Amino acid sequence: MQRGYPGGRTLQAQQTLFGLRGRPSQEQLAASAAAIQAGAAQGEPISLSALARLYFAGFPAGNIPKNWAKARTVWEEAIGKGYLLAGNFLIAMYYYGYGGPADQAKAIALAKRLAGLGPFGEAFLATAYYFRVAGEPQDPKRACQLAQKSRDHLQGVTIYALCLLDGHLPGGRAQGYAWLLKAAAGGNDLAKSLAPEWEKRLTKEEVDEAKRLLPNLK
């Protein structure tokens, strides 16, 4: 930052926003958002990705409205300028159609590029192998291995839950449904759509056991 790199200012601003530099005041929050916007205006890719995150969630302290279409566009600009990790956020946006049309083939292609760089890519690759998405071969064993590795991401949690529910991994259906409820509570669209269906397929004892397990899942 001291040498004039706008990305440095952005990283410091993010530390402030995340509370890593103490509890921020409204003035500090506004100043941090302004620093990120200034870096993005210069086309600095880390700043662009940070600004996209503010658009994705909305950031009233910086007068930044929630706008998924804008977030998607800005993340695309960031990855176009070489910041590959911006793709972590784009995978889900492409897969589920947040801020623009859904394109699962594009999502899975990007997930392949990001595999090994954190749970995002691996979670969606697990999805592709589990459901045969975007022309990928159906391979539950590989999908479940990736799901186990990517449980830091709710999409990975969802596929891990299905691996337990369908008997591809040991642990039982009650535990699988507990993980599915966890992902659904976190807002994962796939988990939210599958949880009611699975509740009908389980016994009352399995559902009750899942709800008992849910608070202590790790």
Image (spheres, helix red, strand yellow):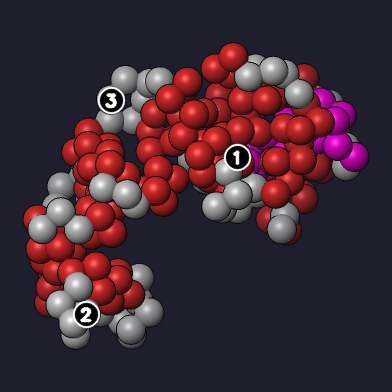
Nearer to the camera, 17 or 197: 17
Q: Tell me: 129 left or right of 26.
A: right
Main SS category, magenta section: helix
Residue type at tag 3? Gly
At x 69% / y 41%, what residue is drawn? 147
Residue type at tag 1? Ala
The 10 Å Cα crowd at callout 1, few under 14, some 14 to 19, many 20 or more, is many
Residue type at tag 2? Met
Q: Where is residue 194 in the image (x, y as percent from the top left)?
A: 62, 24
Mark identifier at residue 123: 1
Quadrant containing the N terminus in the rendered view = bottom left
Residue 180 visible in rendering: no
Q: Position of residue 27 (x, y in %)?
A: 12, 77
Between label 2 and label 1, give the one nearer the viewer. Answer: 2
The 10 Å Cα crowd at callout 2, few under 14, some 14 to 19, many 20 or more, is few
Query: Residue 102's image quarter?
Result: top left
The 10 Å Cα crowd at callout 3, few under 14, some 14 to 19, many 20 or more, is some
Mark identifier at residue 100: 3
Mark 1 residue element = helix
Q: Tell me: 40 left or right of 192.
A: left
Q: Give the range drawn in magenta.
A: 156-170
Q: Name the residue under label 2.
A: 1
Question: Magenta segment: does it hold 159?
Answer: yes
Disc 1 from disc 3: Cα separation: 21 Å
Nearer to the camera, 132 or 189: 132
